[in-house]
Amino acid sequence: MAKPEGFSSLKEFVDLVQSQKFGTFSATNLQGFKVATEDAFAHMQAHILRLYENTEALHSFVDETGAVYDCIPAEQQLSIRRSRQRIPSAPDAPKHRAARSSKDERRDSLIVLPLGPNKKDRFGNIMHAPEGTIPMRRVTMEQLARFETLMDFYRKGPRGAGRPPRFIEPETVAPTHRWAHAYQFASNGGGHSYLNLWAPFVNTVNGQIFSLSQHWYVGGSGGNLQTLECGWQVYSQFYGDSRPHLFTYWTADNYNSTGCYNLTCDAYVQLPGAPIAPGMPLGPVSVIGGPQYIIELTYWHTGGRWWLYFNGTSGSNAIGFYPDTIYQGGALAGNASEIDYGGETVGTISFPQMGSGLYANEGWQRAAYQRTIGYYPPQGGAMINANLTPSQGWPDWYTAQVNMYGSPWFETLWYGGPGGFDPAIVPDVLQIFASQASDLVIGAGLVPRFTGPNHTNSWVFSQSPTAGHTVPRGSTVTMRLRDDPLP
């Protein structure tokens, strides 16, 4: 096989990973390097070597962001090597059971497929996988090193983020993520929507992490909660750029010890000949007041597999599947009990734009949407229009509304918003000891800073900002201390 033009071959890449040392790597990759320990680095290194063990690339190319895709024989992907299953032919998904209605005049367009035998990358390599192979996005130490541990890399998002929206968002919901979405409790074997494509701004300097639009199919509860997910996502820590990317995700145990994105572990099976692969950047993106672009995503459960379809529902549009076995006999080894569609953001002291960055009521050519939303009855048959309930737990930042339109839009969710800073109220810490003041400030989501003598008996003489002010979470409260007796 010919060596790719412009970058290392898969063999050269694997040899490099084997030779990398924690100290040298950390010293030369300072920007974004977060690996916690030398052991964590070794676990990441071993994972990459396991992904590519006994694997050969018949062809490779890069996408427009510079990410490398190695076209490996489909049977060499980790999920197949571990299970030793054969890859079946993809079935056609059932059609939409559409009621007769008037035509909707709004027009959007499917995006341009990124792969094809007539497309070349910046180095002249053909952006097309040879017959019988899959284009697998190369997982690198540089990508993994943006996370503290391998488990952090696997997770949907940091600090527990990624749990699916609930009927009513509970007070215990992680402070790191927000949603605007719509749901329906219905026994189902998957579902469908067209997802309006945007590139929301995610300001990582202000602690913003990702913004996405997706499907959730949910079963079980508590520690046995299971999900099947797909959509588009802007997540620079994971992908290394600010473009929207196609993604898949799953968990069998409420995001505790199972789950991963795309082909980064041994769950998802990618099909040879697919027109796109999870992890690839998507475009063009929609323009406020201008053209609107969409992708079509479908999950359908049949024959012990959750099939994923892209831009169509015929067998030729299938791009991969999750086998029932990853759910270990749990709820999604059969059917899901809930469908959910919408946006999710993750941040720390502030939260990014969702969708277009505009609220749901802005409507066509302004707000983001998912349309033609429906689900498949578990016993089989045509797709049924959804009957969704919108949920907007943070309406100052993001909103959601549902409308039923004529063909071809039918059930439609409008959603999105500008995001913003997570507010915190400055506590009153005057005339209390420094240790107590520190606990109060930290408990309010703020950062304590002391000036003056800081001893066991030091107390707060003045503070800035003063008590009762609303400031962004993560802001600093400066406290001037004295160590003479309290008045």
Image (cartoon, rainbow, N blue to C red):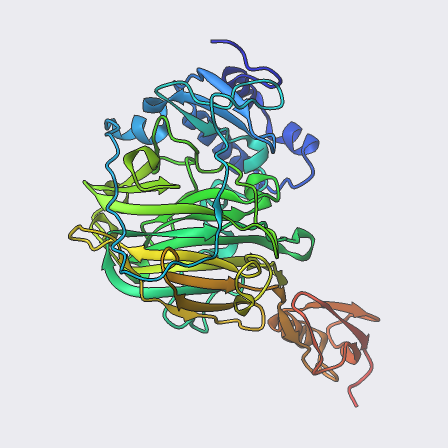
Residue 102's quadrant in the figure?
bottom left
The relative height of residue 40 versus residue 165 in the rendered view (above or below) is: above
- Quick one: which residue is furthest to the bottom in this view? 487
The relative height of residue 257 versus residue 70 in the rendered view (above or below) is: below
Question: Is 405 displayed left or right of 300 in the figure?
Answer: right
Is residue 160 shown to the viewer in this render? yes
The relative height of residue 318 versus residue 228 in the rendered view (above or below) is: above
Residue 162 percent location from the top left of the image: 45, 55
Front-lying residue, 192 or 172: 192
Question: Is 252 displayed left or right of 428 in the figure?
Answer: left
Q: Residue at x 38, y 46 (%)?
A: 297
The relative height of residue 348 versus residue 435 in the rendered view (above or below) is: above
Q: Give the total number of marks visible in the rendering.
A: 0
Residue 412 percent location from the top left of the image: 41, 62
Residue 121 percent location from the top left of the image: 58, 24
Front-lying residue, 327 or 95: 95
Is residue 258 shown to the viewer in this render? no
